[in-house]
């Protein structure tokens, strides 16, 4: 499948790296799970794969929510929606029926709004309403809620935790952010708490706060006029805003810490399953291999690999078989055609071009298989291979085509 930012790859009917074989059922693995998290580097097809899995499970009869953190509109477009926001939006079953597709359950979709989620978290954690109002109105908070490193990933975890706690959906499928590294999502609770650690922040800014107070006291002793001018130019209110923010946030810190621990327990639970989405490109496979090396450390459950944009080799059991003749048979066919329709020299030239193209394709396919074998050797888990489709996946029909590869036993 050629899907920029969506799924693509080589698939077959349970194709194994060494040839044709039977792989476990993805649908079987998902049967008793409540949370599915798709991770991987950017551009490997997480968003489209997430949408496809959510569609398949909803069509099978479950109430499913797919949550994307990707600001692009690929998910909304593929599901026939004009837009997505921070609230779950129901996908009209009529959209499936219009395409001749079944829909026994319910499909919902939403896109994370980091700022709104951060605000909601502050309100939930605040011990009193006046504390949350003070924080939300504070200029320092308004800046860091958009700028903190790891905010997006952490807020995604906060959002999915709240969704699972409400128990409104049978299954939640999470399309993780297009981060540089697959582990950013898993690291986010600890990284977020490190950044928001009031003790650390106060150590960093405490000196500045005290120095500011002492400096202004000294300036006022010199002249009130200069002091007033300096305060207007440098913003003494900045020190005041920072001080008020940290004092108010101190009352929320315990809630953040407890919630971070609960989120990690959720991700490590038996009802959660991770799938690593990748492509056969060596750089993507290297990152996937690094993820495998860390999976035990995090205590997460890896369900398997979904390898997109794979070039299949002749003889693999594909759902849409395209017979590929060998070079000698191809030459014989063209020579037969030449006797009635074209000059032999023209056919020879065409044959040469076709053989050269086939050799290049064969080299790509061979490289793909070598990279896939590298993954298979490191983890004995489900591996789904998705072919490099001839068109982008951008609608429900395309997602259904993808699911023919993903969900088949």
Image (cartoon, helix red, strand yellow):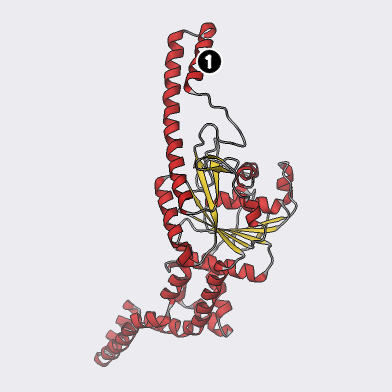
Q: Is residue 157 left or right of residue 33?
A: left
Q: Tell me residue 130's x, y (percent).
A: 56, 84
Taking 106 as reference, is 144 above or below it? below
- Residue 1 visible in image: no
Say which quadrant the N terminus sits in.
Answer: top right
The residue at the point 58 percent across, 66 percent down is 160
Q: Tell me residue 337's x, y (percent).
A: 53, 11
The residue at the point 71 percent across, 47 percent down is 95
Q: How many marks?
A: 1
The residue at the point 60 percent across, 44 percent down is 22
The residue at the point 42 percent across, 67 percent down is 149
Q: Is residue 204 left or right of residue 354?
A: left
- Residue 286 visible in image: yes
In the image shown, does 39 or 72 lie closer to the viewer? 39
The residue that label 1 is drawn on is: 333
Q: Tell me residue 245's x, y (percent).
A: 45, 81
Q: Is residue 249 left or right of residue 238?
A: right
Q: Secondary structure at mark 1?
A: helix
* Outermost residue, left side: 222
Taking 367 as reference, is 207 above or below it? below
Q: Residues within 10 Å of mark 1 (few under 14, many from 20)?
A: few
Residue 267 lies in quadrant: bottom right
In the image shown, does 179 or 215 lie closer to the viewer? 179
In the image shown, does 252 or 263 lie closer to the viewer? 263
Q: Tell me residue 303's x, y (percent).
A: 56, 57
* Outermost residue, bottom side: 221
Taking 254 as reference, is 37 above or below it? above
Residue 321 lies in quadrant: top right
Taking 166 as reference, is 398 above or below it? above
């Amino acid at each position: 499948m050629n899907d920029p930012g969506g799924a693509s790859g080589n698939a077959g009917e349970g194709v194994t790296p060494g040839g044709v074989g039977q792989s476990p059922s993805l649908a079987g693995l998902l049967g008793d799970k409540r949370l599915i998290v798709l991770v991987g580097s950017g551009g490997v097809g997480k968003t489209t794969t997430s949408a496809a899995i959510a569609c398949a499970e909803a069509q099978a009869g479950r109430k499913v929510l797919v949550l994307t953190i990707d600001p692009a509109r690929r998910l909304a477009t593929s599901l026939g929606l004009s837009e997505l926001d921070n609230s779950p939006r129901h996908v009209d079953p009529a959209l499936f029926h219009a395409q001749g597709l079944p829909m026994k359950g319910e499909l919902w979709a939403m896109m994370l709004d980091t700022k709104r989620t951060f605000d909601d978290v502050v309100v939930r954690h605040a011990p009193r309403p006046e504390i949350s109002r003070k924080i939300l109105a504070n200029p320092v908070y308004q800046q860091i809620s958009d700028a903190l490193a790891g905010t997006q990933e952490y807020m995604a975890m906060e959002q999915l935790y709240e969704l699972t706690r409400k128990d409104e959906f049978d299954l939640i499928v999470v399309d993780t952010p297009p981060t540089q590294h697959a582990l950013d999502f898993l690291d986010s609770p600890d990284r977020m708490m490190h950044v928001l650690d009031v003790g650390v922040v106060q150590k960093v800014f405490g000196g500045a706060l005290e120095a500011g107070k002492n400096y202004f006291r000294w300036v006022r002793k010199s002249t009130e006029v200069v002091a007033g001018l300096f305060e207007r130019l440098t913003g003494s209110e900045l020190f005041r805003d920072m001080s008020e923010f940290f004092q108010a946030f101190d009352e929320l810190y315990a809630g953040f810490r407890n919630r971070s621990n609960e989120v990690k327990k959720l991700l490590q639970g038996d009802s959660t399953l991770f799938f690593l989405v990748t492509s056969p490109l060596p750089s993507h496979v290297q990152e996937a291999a690094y993820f495998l090396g860390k999976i035990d450390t995090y205590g997460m459950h890896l369900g398997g690999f979904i390898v997109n944009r794979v070039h299949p080799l002749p003889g693999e059991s594909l759902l849409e078989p395209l017979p590929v003749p060998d070079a000698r048979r191809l030459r014989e066919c063209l020579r037969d055609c030449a006797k009635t329709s074209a000059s032999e020299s023209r056919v020879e030239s065409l044959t040469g071009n076709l053989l050269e193209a086939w050799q290049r394709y064969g080299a790509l396919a061979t490289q793909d298989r070598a990279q896939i074998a590298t993954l298979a050797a490191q983890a004995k888990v489900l591996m789904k291979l998705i072919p490099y489709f001839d068109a982008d996946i951008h609608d429900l029909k395309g997602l259904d085509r993808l699911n023919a590869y993903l969900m088949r036993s």
